[in-house]
């Protein structure tokens, strides 16, 4: 099953994740021809824990942050 982020925009800026066996494939729906980024179960678990702990909380809503 492929899951698309609920925060994806109407312009097609979609991050998608699909579990394939013990791997997690991350793709960008705007560029379906590009290969997926593939992560092991342990790598994916570590990433999700980091997200939940705020380790990746960049200020993506600030115009200054996008120019840096």
Image (spheres, helix red, strand yellow):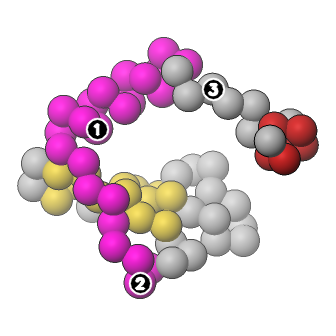
Vertical placement of residue 23 versus 11, above or below: above
Magenta extent: 32-54
Task: Determine crowd level at label 2: few under 14, some 14-19, many 20+ residues with C-alpha closer than 10 A.
Answer: few
Query: CA–CA distance between discs 2 and 3?
Result: 29 Å
- Is there any visible trace of residue 46 in the rendered image? yes
Horizontal relation, residue 64 to residue 41: left or right: right
User: Of callouts 3 and 1, which one flags the residue occurring earlier in the amino acid sequence?
Assistant: 1
Task: Determine crowd level at label 1: few under 14, some 14-19, many 20+ residues with C-alpha closer than 10 A.
Answer: some
**Percent coordinates x, y for residue 53 in the rendering:** 48, 15
Q: Residue at x 49, y 67 (%)?
A: 28
Task: Determine crowd level at label 3: few under 14, some 14-19, many 20+ residues with C-alpha closer than 10 A.
Answer: few
* Outermost residue toward the top in this view: 53
Q: Residue at x 57, y 50 (%)?
A: 6
Look at the image and say whether residue 21 sits in the magenta stretch: no
Question: Which part of the image, by quadrant, shows the C terminus?
Answer: top right
User: Of callouts 1 and 2, which one flags the residue occurring earlier in the amino acid sequence?
Assistant: 2
Q: Disc 3 on helix, strand or loop?
A: loop
Find disc 1 in the rendering and name its residue: 44
In terms of image quadrants, where is residue 50? Answer: top left
Find disc 2 in the rendering and name its residue: 33
Find disc 3 in the rendering and name its residue: 57
* Outermost residue toward the front in this view: 68
**Percent coordinates x, y for residue 47 in the rendering:** 37, 32
In terms of image quadrants, where is residue 35? Answer: bottom left
Query: CA–CA distance between discs 3 and 1?
Result: 17 Å
Q: Disc 1 on helix, strand or loop?
A: helix
Horizontal relation, residue 7 to residue 22: left or right: right
Q: Disc 2 on helix, strand or loop?
A: loop
């Amino acid at each position: 099953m492929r899951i698309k982020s609920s925060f994806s925009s109407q312009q097609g800026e979609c991050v998608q994740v699909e579990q394939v066996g013990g791997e997690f494939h991350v793709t960008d729906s705007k560029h379906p021809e590009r290969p997926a980024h593939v992560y092991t179960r342990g790598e994916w678990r570590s990433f999700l824990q980091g997200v939940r702990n705020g380790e990746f909380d960049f200020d993506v809503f600030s115009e200054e942050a996008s120019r840096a």
